[in-house]
């Protein structure tokens, strides 16, 4: 897998990452969602540099020019719930992308430290030969990303797969590296050191779904 850790280079991205992590600023859910969206825009822009382009002739009011435009047929798939603002950010840049949504949540069976991933809702176009972007802001154990990717398999074989995440734990990145093929790309805005015993990223930011949309009752 090709891992692109965008925060290796300083940029305005650092501001948005610091705000979603900051215990005070993150309480403003509108700002939290907007920051995730802005990070989605930046990750999408960085990812776009790896896509395929071909020359188009553009007529301006004063003449013609050639410009290389995106060839890829993109399907943008986000993991509910926390993926929604990230999806919006990516869709801001990939105007003609097709869209897919899939749900994944942690179901705690007996104790708070063990869980399984439940995939229930799935709406997806044909993926055959397309460029699949699978987006989820938090990459903790990596199990949601893998479970959703497996659930998408009946929809066709994508030409390219790009995973997009905002904050990951090194453990989750390693898990994806051993479960996705070497051609897959991971575009990520920050990689943290570890997970706690409940599978939360440390230092991370807390619960992204709750920060974006409010607390939910455990099922
Ligand atoms: O890498 P993993 O260990 O699988 O964890 C990451 C998952 O956890 C969060 O979702 P959560 O289950 O909190 O659902 P939510 O988006 O509805 O809050 C996050 O959005 C990922 O989907
Ligand atoms: O740290 C984490 C891990 C999973 N889901 C989150 O929202 N945060
Ligand atoms: Mg989730």
Image (cartoon, helix red, strand yellow):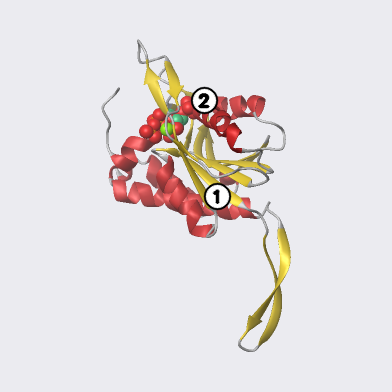
**Under 8 Å from ligand 1: the CB of mark 1?**
no
For residue 89, say whether it is visible: yes
Q: Which residue is mark 1?
A: 43
- Residue visible at 50% across and 48% down in the picture: 99
Q: Local crowd at mark 2 within 10 Å, few (<14), some, or many (≥20)?
A: some
Quadrant containing the N terminus is: top right
* Helix, strand or loop for disc 2: helix
Q: Residue 41, percent across and down?
A: 50, 54
Residue farthest to the bottom, as pictured: 62
Report, in whole angstroms, how far the alpha carbon at label 1 lies from the one at label 2. Answer: 21 Å
Q: Quadrant of residue 170?
A: top right
Query: Residue 136 — which label?
Result: none
Quadrant containing the C terminus is: top left
Q: Residue 203, percent across and down?
A: 43, 31
Q: Quadrant of residue 103?
A: top left
14 shown above or below 218: below
Residue farthest to the top, as pictured: 110
Q: Which residue is mark 2?
A: 143
For residue 206, say whether it is visible: no
Q: Nearer the viewer, mark 1 or mark 2?
A: 2
On screen, residue 211 versus residue 13, left or right, reads left
On screen, residue 36 versus residue 62, left or right, reads left
On screen, residue 181 versus residue 166, left or right, reads right
- Residue visible at 62% across and 54% down in the picture: 48
The quadrant of the picture showing ligand 2 is top left
Q: Residue 167, percent across and down?
A: 49, 37
- Residue visible at 52% across and 25% down in the picture: 143
**Under 8 Å from ligand 1: the CB of mark 2?**
yes
């Amino acid at each position: 897998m090709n891992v692109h850790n965008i925060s290796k280079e300083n940029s305005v991205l650092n501001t948005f990452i610091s705000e979603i992590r900051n215990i005070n600023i993150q309480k403003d859910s509108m700002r939290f969602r907007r920051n995730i969206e802005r990070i989605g825009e930046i990750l999408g822009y960085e990812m776009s540099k790896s896509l395929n382009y071909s020359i188009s002739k553009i007529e301006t009011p004063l003449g013609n020019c050639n410009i290389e435009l995106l060839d890829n047929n993109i399907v943008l798939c986000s993991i509910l719930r926390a993926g929604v603002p990230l999806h919006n950010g990516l869709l801001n840049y990939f105007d003609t992308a097709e869209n897919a949504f899939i749900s994944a949540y942690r179901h705690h069976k007996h104790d708070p430290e063990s869980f399984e991933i439940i995939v229930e809702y799935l709406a997806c176009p044909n993926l055959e030969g397309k460029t699949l972007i699978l987006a989820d802001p938090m990459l903790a154990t990596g199990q949601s990303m893998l479970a959703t990717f497996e659930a998408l398999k009946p929809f066709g074989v994508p030409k390219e797969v790009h995973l997009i995440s905002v904050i990951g734990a090194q453990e989750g990145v390693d898990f994806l590296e051993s479960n996705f093929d070497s051609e897959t790309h991971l575009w990520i805005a920050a990689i943290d050191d570890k997970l706690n015993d409940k599978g939360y990223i440390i230092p991370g930011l807390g619960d992204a779904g709750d920060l974006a949309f409010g607390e939910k009752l455990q099922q």
